[in-house]
Every structure is written in C-alpha cells, then in structure tokens.
Image (cartoon, grey):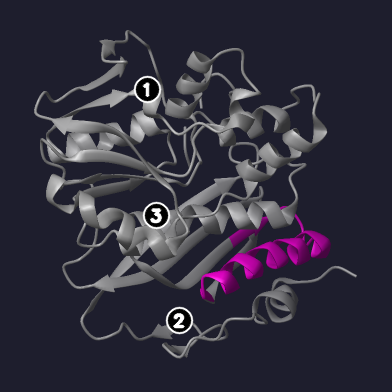
Amino acid sequence: MTRNEFDLIRDYFARQPVNRRDVALGIGDDCAITEVPDGCQLVVTTDTLVEGTHFLPSAKASDVAHKALASNLSDLAAMGAMPAWCSLALTLPDSDEAWVAGFCQGFSALAEHFQVQLIGGDTTRGPRSITMTLHGHVPKGQALTRSGAKPGDWIYVTGSLGESQAGLAYVLGKPIVDEARANRLINHHYRAQPRVAAGQALRGIASAAIDISDGLYADLTHILQASDVGAQIEVTRLPISERLLAEVDSETAAQKMALMSGEEYELCFTVPEMHRGTLDTALKHSGTKVQRIGQINGHRALELVSQGQPLDWTLTGWDHFKESNCDGS
C-alpha cells in the first residue's frame, strides 16, 4: 500500500526519542513554538543534501540522515552553540517506507545523542533531497565567529584530517585491498562525529573558528578573509592518522589530502598566546584531541611550509564526488 505524506509524518517523524522542555509546541501544527533560554542568543544554520551531489543513490538512508544532521551540528559547533531544535524538509521520488524508516533510524540516533528535537518540516515529491535547519543557542556575546583572528594567534585543528576523502574514494569504487580499513574510512566519510562539546569549550578561549566542511585549506582561508589577516601552516604538523598514511603513496600525498579533504566536520580555530595554557584544560572533558599547525600573521595570505621551507603547492577545496578535487556541504 502506498503511504501518503501524513501517514509518513505520523508513523515516523512524529515519534522521536527527544522531548525538550523548551519546546512549547512541536510537530502537528502550522508552526512550532520554542523558548530561548534567558541570556542566550538564537543560532540558526541550514544545509541541503542532494542525491547524486552529496550522496549516491546506493547510500544507506541511515548514513544519509547522519550526514545531514552532522553537517548542521558541525556548523553549530563552530559557533560554540548548544544544539536544540531541528526542522526537516524531505523531498522523495516516492513514498518509500523502507527508506524513510532507515532515515529516521539514523536521524534519531544522532539527534538523541545531542538532545536535538525535531519540531517540524515538510515532505514533498521530487528528486531526493534533504534540507535541515538546526537551531541552537549560545550565551549572549559568546558566539565564536570567523572574524576574530589576530596576528600572533596560534592555529589549531581537532581530530585527524584526510580520512573523509579517503573513504569517499572507496564509495566511488576504488578497489578494496584491506576490507576492514576500507570500511572504517567509508564509515568516517558518512558518519563523522561533529565536535559540539569542543566548540562549547572553546568559548572565551578561541578568537575565531570554523568547521572543516570545504577542506582545511579553503576553510582557513575564510577565517583569514573575515579577519583580514594571513597565516603560515607547517604541513609536517598536520594531524594525519596511520590509517590514512597506509592509503597513499607518500607523506606528501597525505599532507595534501589533509589540506583538501572536505566533510571532515572537525574544527579549525585560532587561540591567542594568553589563552594557550588554558586550552588543554578546557578541552579535557570533550574527549577531543587538538593539534597546533601554524600561526596567524599580518601578511594577508596563506603560506604553506615544510620544516620552515616554503612550498609551492596548488590546492583547491572539496568538490563532491570528484576524488582529486573535493567542495563541502
């Protein structure tokens, strides 16, 4: 039996594990009603994922849901915000109940982990795409932005870089030699964990921040442009895992992948010298490793060096489903 829009909403989207006290009215009316905590500002982000651009038709619905929500959560993390509510616009070519069930499973698992409540949205017929709008809040005046970096600030990144692009190569059909390693990399591409706790811990410490969705090189450039500064990156300090090194021909190839790989959902941020001593303490309970990779300067350009020697590398951002040249969601 073909299910209509209202059946799908009632049977899947209206039933969810998160029911926040600050939601006065959720799914089921023309609009939702929420309450922003006293002394906080509302933070809002929207991302769209389109089949064939951001994910393949063969992708598991649960993976697509995780990726869609993680993308939005990573944006909130980069602002130091606390996630709260989500609205979802889902466009489907038909009322595929099995796909919707898988999507809801992937969405609910990540939403429950970060206590995000689905408060409304829309479903319609058309080429498969997902648009999520995520709402969060941050103490007034404490949001992290891209525009606060100053000469002398140190540049850090969370986690390790490059594995999302390595996983995408397998998604696109790269021959598998080591199945276990390939599966881990594919999982990293689809199910990256946004650094929400780390973003909140960086409030009052980081001078600027951004999430790595378009690749470190491209996204750090956004900070430099917004802050009207330059930077020098020491590529030998880039956080690269042994798993990635096993995938490529050389350390140089791994370094370039770490600089260009998008959809990592790690954070790149800058820290003034006066706050360096408090960084490790602040991140202690977030379970997030960070690596210092360079320093902000006043040159208004991004310079790459290896052991202090300038590099003449031509790099680009993330381009969906092009292994050599990837662009974030």
Which circle, 2 or 1, is nearer the viewer?
1
Q: Is residue 321 visible?
A: no
3 or 2: tag closer to the N-terminus: 2
Residue 157 coordinates in the image, percent (x, y): 37, 41
Sequence-wise first label, 1 or 3:
3
Q: Depth check: 284 or 324 in front? A: 284
Q: Tell me the kind of residue under disc 3.
A: Asp
Please name which of the two marks, 1 or 3, marks the residue nearer to the observer: 1
Residue 199 percent across, percent down from the top left: 35, 59
Image x and y of residue 304, in percent = 30, 18
What residue is rendered at 39% in x and 54% in y? 75
Image quarter hosting the N terminus: bottom right
Comparing labels 3 and 2, the label whose residue is closer to the camera = 3
Residue at 19% from the left image edge and 22% from the top image edge: 301
3D distance between C-alphas at marks 1 and 3: 25 Å
Is residue 6 inside the magenta stretch?
no
Residue to which mark 1 is pinned: 235
Residue sitting at 25 percent across and 62 percent down?
A: 203
Q: Amino acid at mark 1?
A: Val
Q: Which residue is mark 2?
A: 31
The span picked out in magenta is 90-117
Q: Quadrant of residue 183?
A: top right
What separation in Å lies between label 2 and label 1 (alpha carbons)? Answer: 49 Å
Look at the numbered disc 3 and give the secondary structure of its residue: helix
Instruction: Determine which residue is flagged by label 3.
Output: 75
Position of residue 212 relative to residue 171, above or below, is below
